Image: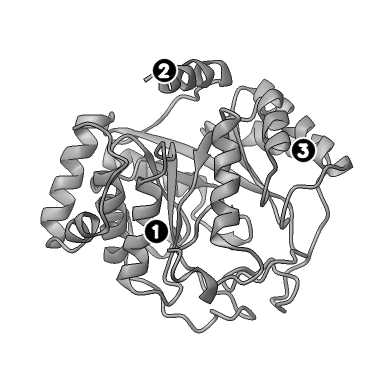
Amino acid sequence: MSLRNDWTFEEIQAIYHKPLLDLVYEAATVHRNNNIASDVQICTLLSVKTGGCTEDCAYCPQAARYNTGLKAHKLLDVDDVLSKAQEAKENGSTRFCMGAAWREMRDNRDFEKVLDMVKGVNQIGLEVCCTMGMLTEEQAVKLKEAGLSAYNHNLDTSEDYYDKIITTRTYEDRLKTIGHVRKAGISVCSGGIIGLGEDETARIGMIHTLANLPQHPESVPVNALVPVEGTPLEEQKRVSAFEMVRMIATVRIVMPKTQVRLSAGRLDMSVAEQALCFMAGANSIFAGDKLLTTPNPNYTDDMAMLDILGLKPLEPVTVNEIQTTAVCHHEH
């Protein structure tokens, strides 16, 4: 099955609406044909700058305009971040992701500190990812030179539903940042959140946009909204595990080689429910007790779960190896 970037909305819709077990079976088959099904990438996500963000993302406790009781803190010191990265590596993580609640990256002392963090994490021998808002082309190049493996910039939802969730920037802004990341030769991590009050059309629309990017994102996180008191979405009903499974399976079928990350919302899922997600093609999780500011299962529980399911944590890929594969992609 060759990779396609010309999926129609109707094709993805037809996949998404298949009977659940047929869908999981098909996704599991695609997954096994394109990936080593027992490998799971373990990532750790650290909030290196929390709260005080000027955006109005309706789901986010870090937006300055909502009163969620979150204590804001400025950018952490490089040494503190590196000791957390070392700890993550000892706990079996192969990718370390640093999140900063900024609308966009600015060219200032903080950016210089971020570049030092990237260099340091890279030297520890972990893949390093950042998620820090919008980026310019020049900043993406500097991050790449510092050794950044991946940049996360989620689409969150479909283009049509986007302005119901965020009004402080456009969908086009999101796609532009993803373009800058891709152009700099950094791998792209981009997915979204379900349970924002969207309908299935919006979920399919988001997958459609991702699957038709000139190159599929190397990683697609699928998050279930964790409603936070004080945000506009605090009253949202949680999505069921089966909606997560449906989402993961569809992403797996249309983007066969992408790492599909079972992200936020895992804390409420039983091992059996998560097992269905792995069966449907999820092959990456965030480990550690926090995802930026929302609770997440702890390492010990996760390792026990992987053990029960016969899954094994993936070895890290260094930046040099990523560069080689990136070069191959461009030649084809």
- Between 93 and 12, the one nearer to me in the picture: 12
Q: Please name the residue that numbered disc 3 is placed on.
A: 114
- Element type where label 2 sits in the image: helix
Task: List x then y, in percent, for residue 237.
Answer: 42, 80
Say which residue appears at 72% left-offset and 26% top-offset: 119
Residue 229: quarter of image: bottom right
Percent across and percent down for residue 76 are 81, 46
Amino acid type shown at disc 2: Glu
Residue plotted at (56% across, 27% down):
185
Asked if residue 137 lies left or right of residue 310, the reply is right
Can residue 83 be seen here?
Answer: no
Tell me the crowding category of disc 1: few under 14, some 14 to 19, or many 20 or more residues within 10 angstroms, Cα based. many
Q: Is residue 171 left or right of residue 142?
A: left
For mark 3, give the secondary structure.
helix
Q: Closer to the observer: label 1 or label 3?
A: 1
Q: Marks 1 and 3, Cα distance to the nearest angstrom?
A: 30 Å
Q: Which residue is mark 1?
A: 206
Of pointers 1 and 2, the one earlier in the residue sequence: 1
The residue type indicated by label 1 comes to Met
Indicate whether 266 appears above or below 61.
above
Disc 1 versus disc 2: nearer the observer: 2
Kindly identify which residue carries mark 2.
Answer: 331
Residue 46 on image: x %, y %: 65, 47
Q: Is 299 or 100 nearer to us in this picture?
A: 100
Disc 1 to disc 2, C-alpha distance: 28 Å
Q: Sequence-wise, which precedes: disc 1 or disc 3?
A: 3
Label 2 Cα crowd, 10 Å radius (few <14 / some 14-19 / many 20+): few
Q: Quadrant of the N terminus?
A: top left
**Circle 1/circle 2 CB separation < 8 Å:** no
